[in-house]
Structure formats: C-alpha cells, structure tokens
Image: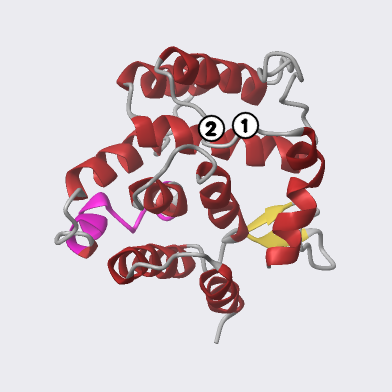
C-alpha cells in the first residue's frame, strides 16, 4: 500500500459521511486523486519528511475539509475540491478520463465544468494568474468559487501569508494569492455564499492543529 493510499484510507475512516451514494462518489474521487498525485510532492511544514517535502495528496484533502464549512449539503463541492489539481498536475490525465469515471453521477456536467474552471493552463503572460482568477469570478460557479477560496487559504497557510482580517475576513496581503483571495471572497459575498457556521476565533486559532490531528 502506497503512502498516498494510506493517507486516503485514514481520511475516509475519519470522515463523517453517512450516506452510501455520497460515500461511493467521494471515495472514487479520493482514490483517483491518490493515483494521479502518487508521485507529487510539495514544500511545506505539514507532515514534511527530512527533505521538507510532503505528499501532495494532503493538499486536496485539506481543501475539501475547508470547503465543507460553506453551506454544502451535497457532495459535488467536495469532489471538485479533491480533484481540482488532478488534470493540472498530471497532463496525461485528461478531462475525458474524469468524464468516464463520473458518467453516472447525476451532476457530472457541473462537476466537470467546475474542475475545468479550476485547471490552470500556464502561459508566459505576466498577468496570467489574475486572468485565471477573473475567469473563475466571472463564472459565478458555486463549486469553483468555494473550492478556489479553500485552495487559496490552504496555499497561504502553507506559505505563511496572512489572509484574514478580523473585521472584514478579506486578505490584507499584496501577494498574488492575497489579491486573488480578496477577489474570490468579494464575489462570494456578492452572491451571498456564506459559511454555514460563522468562523470563530477558536476556529482560526485551532484549525491547523485540528486538521493535523485528523491525519
């Protein structure tokens, strides 16, 4: 059993999903991500090895956890979160592969649309990243917005970039992630996409410790 699969099994056993169909689709997404990211590593302090590297699979799992705090009653948002980097990190894994894997899902088209929006196709343009963020903002796609919000939070936490002002919840950072986060959060506020439970000081202070213990 690879390290990625062990991480996935721990995530699934600790999750609070109770409905068989929901578990089926989430398990499928998690196992696809584990295979796609099997050889992916990232720099960071979270579960780092002696080289300061961590299995990349931790990132989409954490993003899925973060996305759940929004009023998500169905599993599509979590599926999108878990798979949001799959195509970008593995060019040989095409959208058609995901289409085949989720062909029987009742909201297959919505899931694929959101993942496509979140997939970066890097260019040499200096303003490419903000153009990519603007595309997500303009889409008004619930899943893409929520997942990108959670993705940016996880990236900024990993790099030690402050992203929440206690009064406005918006980023105070001039880093590209901070600017992107402010755009995403502003659009979510405009669309009235709110957290199901308001983030408290306890949550802000203890989130990283809690999620570390989960794995």
- Residue 109 figure quarter: top left
Which residue lies at the image location 81% right of the left edge and 59% below the top edge?
A: 52
- Residue 96 position in % (x across, y down): 20, 54
Q: Is residue 83 left or right of residue 25?
A: right
Observer-nearest residue: 28 or 155? 28
Tag of residue 198: 1
Q: Are marks 1 and 2 in contact (CB under 8 Å)?
A: yes
Residue 144 is a magenta residue: no
Observer-nearest residue: 192 or 175? 192
- Residue 163 position in % (x across, y down): 72, 25
Residue at image mark 2:
195
Residue 99 seen anywhere in this rendered image of the structure? yes
Observer-nearest residue: 143 or 177? 143
Magenta residues, start to end: 88-100
Neighbour tally class for label 2: few under 14, some 14-19, many 20 plus, Cα within 10 Å: some
Locate the N terminus and report the quarter of the image it occupies: bottom right
Locate the C terminus and report the quarter of the image it occupies: bottom right
Which residue lies at the image location 44% right of the left edge and 65% below the top edge?
A: 17
């Amino acid at each position: 059993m690879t390290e990625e699969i062990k991480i996935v099994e721990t995530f699934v056993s600790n999750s609070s999903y109770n409905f068989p169909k929901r578990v089926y689709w989430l398990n499928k997404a998690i196992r696809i991500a584990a295979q796609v990211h099997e050889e992916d590593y990232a720099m960071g302090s979270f579960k780092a090895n002696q080289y300061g590297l961590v299995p990349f699979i931790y990132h989409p799992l954490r993003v899925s956890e973060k996305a759940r705090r929004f009023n998500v009653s169905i599993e599509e948002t979590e599926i999108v979160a878990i798979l949001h980097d799959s195509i970008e990190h593995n060019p040989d894994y095409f959208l058609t592969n995901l289409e085949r894997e989720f062909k029987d899902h009742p909201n297959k088209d919505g899931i694929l649309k959101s993942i496509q929006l979140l997939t970066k196709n890097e260019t040499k343009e200096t303003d490419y990243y903000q153009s990519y963020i603007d595309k997500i903002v303009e889409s008004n796609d619930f899943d893409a917005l929520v997942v990108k919000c959670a993705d940016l939070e996880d990236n900024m936490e990993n790099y030690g970039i402050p992203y929440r002002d206690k009064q406005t919840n918006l980023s105070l950072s001039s880093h590209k992630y901070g600017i992107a986060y402010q755009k995403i959060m502003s659009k979510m506020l405009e669309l009235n996409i709110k957290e199901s439970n308001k983030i408290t000081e306890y949550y802000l202070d203890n989130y990283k410790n809690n999620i570390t213990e989960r794995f």
